[in-house]
């Protein structure tokens, strides 16, 4: 049986009004497709770094489990990872990378920090800086020195707080702690609060199973030069993917031997979005990474995009 479809990590539902603030579109804008690029290389970000298209997200469990599942993901072919100090298992995750024998230059590691509970600029900056230092120390104790990208897990509740969070991340980058900066769960207004520099990546629950004007969200991020990465690509914040929608995906994939979940993930990639998944099942991880190696037809993409705008049945 296929795994229970679940979000990549616990996260409160995002306000759709705050996320979008733009009129819905029913067709996708003309955006670069990954189909004509090297899937293994990833997508080129504004700072010249490469974001792999498929990442493994470490969840909340103990260090031993994090170590075992990270090794499992590496064996399946994942070279990009998302970790958070808030999960409490960064040492185990880092030990797995150190034991794997994979050269550090062949890995991409993104670490998020949680600091959205402070509203003032100074307080948010201090809280974020401390969280970054804690995360980097945890990883170093496990054998990993430095990360490729630091990310904010959620925006602060005020513009001053967001500015303080971002100032701390920029300071960490300038000090050599990472090369790139990103955010998670930022709406458009919150992205626009970062007036001095836009993040390279925004992680959102972008999925066929998440109700949003997908095309408009893509277009708005493209205008800002921000690459989207989907968390919870098979579940979203509500831990739900409609059975009727999954059946439609399965019907599209059946003639070629692709599962409904693979088709749903491939739709994300060909929409111009990277994704971050999690599973404890080795076969499911292999299935997820295999979506880098096939392509949906233009007709299938149009069909799926149209389905994303229609009412669901259970």
Image (cartoon, helix red, strand yellow):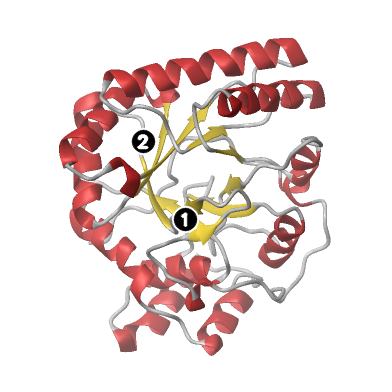
From the image, state whether disc 2 or disc 1 is nearer to you: 1
At horizontal 55% and vertical 24% (from top left) the residue drawn is 114
Q: Quadrant of residue 306?
A: bottom right
- In terms of sequence position, does the residue under pointer 2 or pointer 1 come before the other? 2
Give percent across and percent down for residue 141: 28, 18
Left or right: residue 273 versus residue 118 is left
- In the image, 251 versus 244, the foreground residue is 251
As drawn, 104 above or below 254: above
Disc 2 to disc 1, how far (Cα)? 15 Å
Give percent across and percent down for residue 146: 41, 29
Q: Quadrant of residue 2?
A: bottom left
SS under mark 2: loop
Disc 2, disc 1: CB below 8 Å? no
Query: In the rendering, which numbered label is found on residue 247?
Result: none
SS under mark 1: strand
At horizontal 31% and vertical 86% (from top left) the residue drawn is 256
Q: Give the mark count.
A: 2
At horizontal 54% and vertical 52% (from top left) the residue drawn is 229
Give percent across and percent down for residue 41: 41, 62
* Residue matched to label 2: 59
Quadrant where the N terminus sits is bottom left
* Residue matched to label 1: 275
Whether residue 157 is visible here, answered yes or no, is: no
Q: Quadrant of residue 243?
A: bottom left
Q: Residues within 10 Å of mark 2 (few under 14, many from 20)?
A: many
């Amino acid at each position: 049986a296929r795994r229970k479809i679940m979000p990549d990590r616990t996260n409160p539902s995002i306000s759709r009004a705050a996320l979008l603030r733009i009129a819905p579109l029913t067709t996708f804008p003309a955006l670069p497709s990954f189909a004509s690029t090297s899937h293994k290389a990833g997508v080129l970000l504004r700072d010249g770094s490469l974001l792999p298209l498929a990442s493994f997200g470490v969840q909340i469990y103990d260090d031993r489990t994090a170590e075992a599942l990270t090794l499992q993901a590496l064996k399946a072919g994942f070279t990009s990872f998302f970790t958070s100090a808030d999960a409490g298992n960064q040492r185990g995750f880092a030990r797995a990378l150190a034991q794997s024998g994979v050269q550090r230059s062949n890995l991409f590691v993104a670490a998020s920090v949680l600091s959205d509970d402070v509203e003032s600029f100074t307080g948010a900056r201090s809280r974020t800086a401390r969280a970054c230092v804690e995360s980097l120390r945890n990883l170093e104790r496990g054998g990993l020195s430095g990360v490729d990208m630091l990310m904010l897990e959620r925006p602060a509740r005020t513009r001053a707080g967001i500015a303080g969070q971002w100032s701390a991340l920029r300071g960490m980058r300038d000090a050599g702690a990472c090369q790139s900066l990103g955010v998670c769960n930022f709406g458009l207004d919150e992205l626009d609060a970062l007036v001095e520099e836009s993040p390279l990546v925004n992680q959102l629950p972008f999925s066929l199973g998440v109700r949003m004007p997908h095309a408009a969200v893509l277009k708005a991020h493209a205008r800002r030069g921000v690459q989207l990465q989907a968390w919870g690509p098979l579940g979203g914040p509500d831990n739900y993917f409609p059975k009727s929608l999954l059946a439609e995906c399965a019907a599209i994939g059946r003639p070629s031997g692709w599962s409904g979940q693979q088709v749903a993930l491939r739709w994300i990639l060909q929409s111009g979005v990277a994704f971050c998944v999690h599973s404890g099942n080795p076969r499911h991880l292999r299935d997820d990474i295999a979506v880098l190696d096939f392509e949906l037809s233009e007709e299938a993409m149009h069909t799926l995009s149209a389905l994303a705008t229609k009412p669901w049945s259970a």
